Image: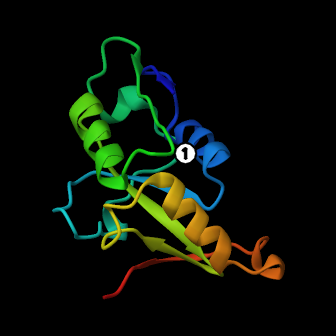
Amino acid sequence: MVINKQKKLKQIKDEFQEQFPFLKLEFYSGFHKQGEGSEKKTMLADGLTIGEVCKLTTEEIISISESMKVSELEKAFKDIFGLSVQVFRKSNNLWLQTTITDGWSLEKQNQNAKEMNVQENLNTEPNDYHEEE
């Protein structure tokens, strides 16, 4: 994924979801601790550009593979862009922050969500929730 300062957060989210249709990214103004979720009130608006939310001076490339762990993806966004990102997994009509399962690969997260979803619920807009132990 190529990211420059003109790219909108929505574009990044859409590109990610093309590769992982049962996952989504959300960007936040503050960082969360490992194993914890991010608060909805700190979520950044989709219409913001990377240049508006971080000091990116050059075009950067972030490699996202199916074998990459959620925690590795979140760390890459923090290290490269100084951005807090959270991965969500679709669970029927809900989106769950992957706080407990950050050690899973993106492929495993996506496959797990795919298996949990029933066909008639695929077109509904889920709500956002944290995973619970």
Q: Residue 127, relative to residue 32: is it above or below?
A: below
Q: Nearer the viewer, residue 125 or 20?
A: 20
Q: Is residue 21 left or right of residue 36?
A: right
Question: How many marks can you see?
Answer: 1
Residue at 57% from the left image edge and 60% from the top image edge: 110
Q: How is the image coloured?
A: rainbow
Name the outermost residue toward the bottom. 133
Identify the amino acid type marked 1. Answer: Lys
Q: Residue at x 31, y 21 (%)?
A: 56
Comparing 45 with 117, the one in front is 117
The x, y position of residue 122, in whole percent, is: 76, 72
Residue highlighted by disc 1: 13
Task: Residue 75: name its quadrant.
Answer: top left
* Res 105 → quadrant: bottom left
- Mark 1, other Cα within 10 Å: few <14 / some 14–19 / many ≥20: some
| Mark 1 residue element | helix
Tell me: residue 27, above or below residue 79: below
**Extreme residue in the top direction:** 58
Residue 25 lies, in percent from the top left, at 48, 53
Can residue 28 be spotted in the picture? yes
At a point 62% along the width and 62% down the height, the residue shown is: 22
Image quadrant for the C terminus? bottom left
| Left or right relative to 54: residue 24 | right
| Most foreground residue, 34 or 83 | 34
